[in-house]
Image (cartoon, rainbow, N blue to C red):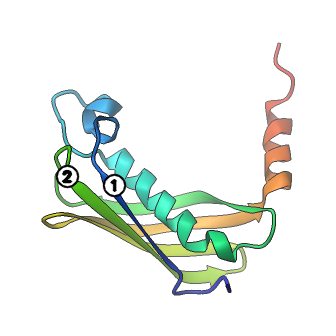
Amino acid sequence: MELAPGLEAEITITVGEEDLATAFGNEGVPVFATPALLSYFESACRQAVEAALPAESLTVGTWAEIKHLAATPPGMKITFKARLTEVERRRLLFEVEAHDEVEKVGEGRHERYYLNAPKFLAKAEEKAGPRE
């Protein structure tokens, strides 16, 4: 598989308690949370390119522009779609959207970079350094 525009992935979840705004500290708002929307968008983007990445690679999110368009209550299904639209060296740009069982609930763009996993993780470990 080639890492090229057009790669897609889709994830469907049932909104659970852990996905609600209340779980993110927004008391009194028991609907699907914006941070959860971004998290599932990121997962769909990773899945879209996973099989096409060079060996020992991983992707990291670097930028997102999303709109959370409608509230979704717990128990309802949401489908998240990601489509790779641009590849520029190691930079990957995706278009994302989400629909619950009634309407579109989110859309946007997300940028990720693919990196050599061992080098990236070693650099992060070095940054942490010894702790006193």
Q: Position of residue 55 (x, y in %)?
A: 81, 69
Q: Quadrant of the C terminus?
A: top right
53 on left or right of 119: left
> Looking at numbered disc 2 in the image, what kind of residue is underneath it?
Met
Q: Quadrant of the N terminus?
A: bottom right
Q: CA separation, marks 2 and 1?
A: 8 Å
Residue at 79% from the left image edge and 56% from the top image edge = 117
Look at the picture and state if 110 lies above or below 14.
below
- Is residue 94 at all visible to an observer of this figure? yes
Look at the picture and state if 30 lies above or below 56.
above
Q: Position of residue 130 (x, y in %)?
A: 87, 23
Question: Circle 1 sits in a helix, a strand or a loop, which is it?
Answer: strand
Residue at 70% from the left image edge and 66% from the top image edge = 114
58 on left or right of 46: right
View extreme (left): residue: 102
Q: Dot 2: within a 10 Å radius of its alpha carbon, few (fewer than 14), some, or many (20 or more) residues?
A: some
97 on left or right of 110: left
Residue at 52% from the left image edge and 60% from the top image edge = 63
Residue located beneath label 1 in the image: 13
| Quadrant hosting residue 19 | top left
- Between residue 15 and residue 89, name the one nearer to us: 15
> Looking at numbered disc 1 in the image, what kind of residue is underneath it?
Ile
Residue located beneath label 2 in the image: 76
Q: Earlier in the sequence, mark 2 or mark 1?
A: 1
